[in-house]
Image (cartoon, rainbow, N blue to C red):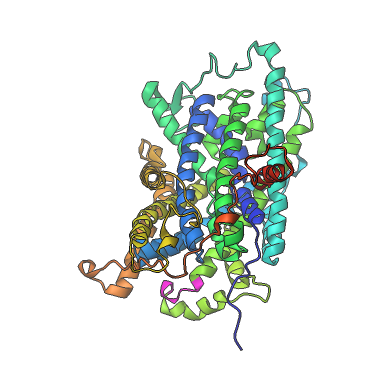
Amino acid sequence: MTRRTVLSPALKERHVNMMAFSACIGFGLFLQSGKVIYIAGPGLAIVAIVLASSVMWSVIACLGEMTALFPVQGPLFEFPGRFIDEAVGYATGWIVWFAWVVILAAEILAVAQLWKFRFDEKYLLDVGYPDKELGWSTEGYSPAVWVFLFLILIGLINLLPVLQYGQLEYVFGVVKIFFISGLIVFNVILSAMQKVPHGNHFWTWNKPYGFAAESLVVHPSHDQDPGIVLRGEQGKFLALWTAVSACVFSFVGFETIAITAPENKDLEKHETLKLATKKLTLRITILYVLCTFVGGLNVPYNDPNLVNIQINSVRAGQNSIFVLAAVRNHLRTWPSFFNGFFIFSATTSGINALYNSSRILHALASIPEAWPLWLQNSRRRLERTTSRGVPLGTVTVSWCFGLIAFLAVKPFPSVVLGRITNNAVVSELICYTVICLSYIQFYHRIKAASEDHTLENRSAFNRDDKQYPYRTHGQLFRAYYGLLFCILLILFNNWRAFVHPFSLPDFIASYIGILAFFALIAAYHVKSDGWNPLQWRRNASMQIHRPPPKVVVPGRRRGHLVFPNPKEPIWSEENFKALVGFIWGWLK
């Protein structure tokens, strides 16, 4: 009997868009934004977010264009293997899969931390909060309870058929968008209310605070002696760089758009990848910038709870700048509500992390060469899917790695969480680097094909042709920009580990991913070419005909405003329908 091994192409553009959005909005925005403000200051934090967004904008466009033309399974490693080297592709696939199971564990760890919601009584007294205590009675529970419960929930949701899963993710994404929009309005109102006691809406930007933080503590702690403190222009530059590195984790997840390619429905008609890529870039950038801006208006960057974030990485909701804004303005109920939503947000991101890791592993399972000989039987089992297209084996294996989250029972789970997330970010940055390099090779390959008159379908490779599925201006430059920026972030993502006192655990967490990546590449070359490195050869097929390139019917292009009757007024029936359809296409 033939066993099913293919995924079900059932997702629509709106599903894909919200799945990627939900993956990007975990605990990063709500908890890490305060960390970024503490490191860099309220103004420089916005600059850091814009820089991190520009890297995401560059990489996602590279990946989106390649996947739109060739919607292959496992694009994160298929394109590096095709345009750089097979060994690089396989190594990328494994480290990205591991990064996503680590992110799954990190999100569940964050959930366990968020249940420990309790403000220090002295802090409440200092800010004049009307109640003596503020917290949840759940802080005494073992973190293992929450890890177990939420692991089960995340696993069960990922067993749903992909269409039902996509619809659920769409609801999650819509809820998050409305909440974040409300959070922005909430903080704007708080800022307007604070003009009376502070005399200025930008009081957190003025002295004794400022646009940028006055100094950067290299190894922050609660000790009387702060250790090495950097000031002046050097301190501001390193603070900016550290803030950019912190922002990158919050943006991890946009590659979900490409991971869903084998399960996308009717790519030519709906142009899923093009629209989802552009929508995600705009939404994430705008919402992150606005949230950080309005949050920085209400909480000074040296708030004691923000310092705690920097010392112990990610803690509970009392370290969120948005919760602090409510507490400093003496509001009841809102802090607990926000913390509850942060649990929901981290859970939904964990659900998406399991989806991504399972699909990446399923794509790897379809490639015998990516596996050792002694694991071929296991590979065949992982390749199978249920009658509804769910890769049950890869979901189960990836879920099991989520048990790493039981590290929450250790004495310092926030430190463990910080190191875990840092390791995952480095692995993702390696993936983004090879994606940009793959695009550069891809760009020159399809350009040569479009000029090859012996090819019957050469117009399909012409980026200036109207049927080309997804093209952005200046993309080659953006690929080089993303490549350079990602390399610098990989090398200097945790420069503070080198400053005395040297931290071996932080160093290992930040840089072992690089060693693992090159070790995997070497292992594949040894397998195919032998032990002599001088005999290793590059194996890149540069294949651009498998699968056949996708084209889009010019008259069906979406995302562009074209009036059916340009000579008639905009409010005429046909033109007005086109305008409404254009707006709805970008909003939904």
Q: Which residues are magenta?
A: 365-371
Residue 178 x, y percent position in the rendering: 72, 40
Nearest the viewer among 298 and 439 is 439
Say which quadrant the N terminus sits in: bottom right
Residue 396 is drawn in which quadrant?
A: bottom right
Q: Does residue 121 appear in the picture of this structure?
A: no
Q: Residue furthest bottom?
A: 1
Does the magenta run of residues contain 366? yes
Residue at 63 percent of width and 38 percent of height: 30
Q: Residue furthest left?
A: 534
User: What is the total number of numbered labels drawn onto the structure image?
Assistant: 0
- 361 vs 519, nearest the viewer: 361
**Residue drawn where x is 68% and y is 45% of the image:** 578
Q: Nearer the viewer, residue 532 or 482?
A: 482
Q: Is residue 132 above or below residue 503?
A: above
Question: Which x, y percent locates residue 561?
Answer: 61, 44
The image shows residue 97 at horizontal and vertical percentages of 50, 61
| Percent position of residue 183, x then y | 69, 33
Kindly identify the residue that appears in the image at 68 percent across and 59 percent down. Answer: 166
Q: Residue at x 69, y 67 (%)?
A: 161
Q: Is residue 479 magenta?
A: no
Can residue 305 be seen in the rendering of this structure? yes
Residue 151 left/right relative to 254: right
**Eyeballing the image, is 322 above or below 10?**
above
* The quarter of the displayed image where residue 150 is located: bottom right
Q: Is residue 558 above or below residue 390?
A: above
